[in-house]
Image (cartoon, rainbow, N blue to C red):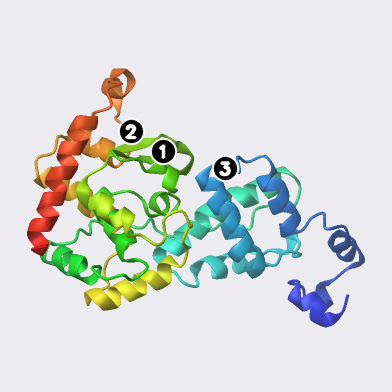
Amino acid sequence: MTRKLERAKGFEPSTLTLATCKDIANNSKTIGAAAQKYFSDKPANERYWKELARRFDTRILPDLGTYTLVSSVTKQKVRDYIWKDQRKYPAAARTLWDALGPFFKFCVQWDYCDKSPMADLIPPPLVPSRDRVLTEDEIAIFWKATADDWYWSSFFRVLLLTGQRRQEIALLKHMNITRDKLIIPSDITKTKTTNVLPMVHMISIELNRSRWLGKNPSGFSKAKKELDKRLGFDDYRIHDLRRTFRTYLSMLRVHPTVAELLINHKVKGVQGVYDRYSYLPEKKEALDKYCTFILSLTNA
């Protein structure tokens, strides 16, 4: 292996030994090989593991080196890797910690290394839960900013009108929409339960004018930046639209059970076990009330 290739694969030429070269050639003790085994028995269709595997493919493996020996990864290397963006992106640092910790424990269990390089590290602090909710004035600005035929306009409006998660709306297909229902199937929901929303006029309008439906759109970060420009503020996340929806349902005196079911939260306790009622009429009443409220803010 040439010196240039050695460095590209995460090694300094002076550190290579005959045994190391053999392991690299066999691809037996590398991060790439360990990751392949790590994910081999994980449920690939579950959202968590699917997203984690994508994170490994797109970031962790390229950054740490697919052909880097697991045993050569030092505590300092992991610490510097996780903490490099801590101040600017605290959530990203915590996400990396949560992803790499179990992985290196797996590597110890399966003899890819003798000790986890994270064993003596202190984890990044937990990121405080967010409480950002769009104000009534901001909702009015939001609605006017998404009134045109921009590709993402109806997408963001559907998020605000339904309170669903970004990916759940992005993965919708035409078959999930009927004249009187919006059906979000269990295979794309975080809770793995189907969420049935009664169709109301405002949601129907936005779905009918959409250009993204059935196309599994991507590029959310760029879309968010464009939306920020249109709004004139950027101190929010796309997920905050979901919190905004749920908060205003409470303000409108929607029953907590109905509000929680609308955002596909599982009802806890005895009620969650025994109450099999669909609450569709109550959901429709709540959505009608909420959409009327949105219209009152926008003077549409």
**Front position in the image: 244 or 161:** 161
The amino acid on which the numbered mark 3 sits, given as a three-letter code, is: Asn
User: Which residue is label 2 attached to?
Assistant: 266
Taking the image as shown, residue 39 lies to the left or right of residue 198, namely right
Query: Residue 75's image quarter?
Result: bottom right
Residue located 30% across and 24% down the image: 272
Image location (x, y in percent) of residue 7: 76, 77
| Disc on the earlier residue, 3 or 1 | 3
In what quadrant of the picture does the N terminus appear? bottom right
Query: Residue 21's image quarter?
Result: bottom right
User: Which residue is label 1 attached to?
Assistant: 191
Disc 1 versus disc 2: distance between alpha carbons? Answer: 8 Å
In what quadrant of the picture does the C terminus appear? bottom left
Image location (x, y in percent) of residue 31: 71, 58
Q: How many marks?
A: 3
User: Which residue is label 3 attached to?
Assistant: 45
Residue located 68% across and 63% down the image: 73
| Disc on the earlier residue, 1 or 2 | 1
Near mark 3 (Cα within 10 A), the count class, few <14, some 14-19 or many ≥20, is few
Are the residues at dot 1 and dot 2 in contact (C-beta closer than 8 Å)? yes
The amino acid on which the numbered mark 1 sits, given as a three-letter code, is: Thr
Taking the image as shown, residue 4 lies to the left or right of residue 62, namely right
Query: Can residue 12 be seen in the rendering of this structure?
Result: no
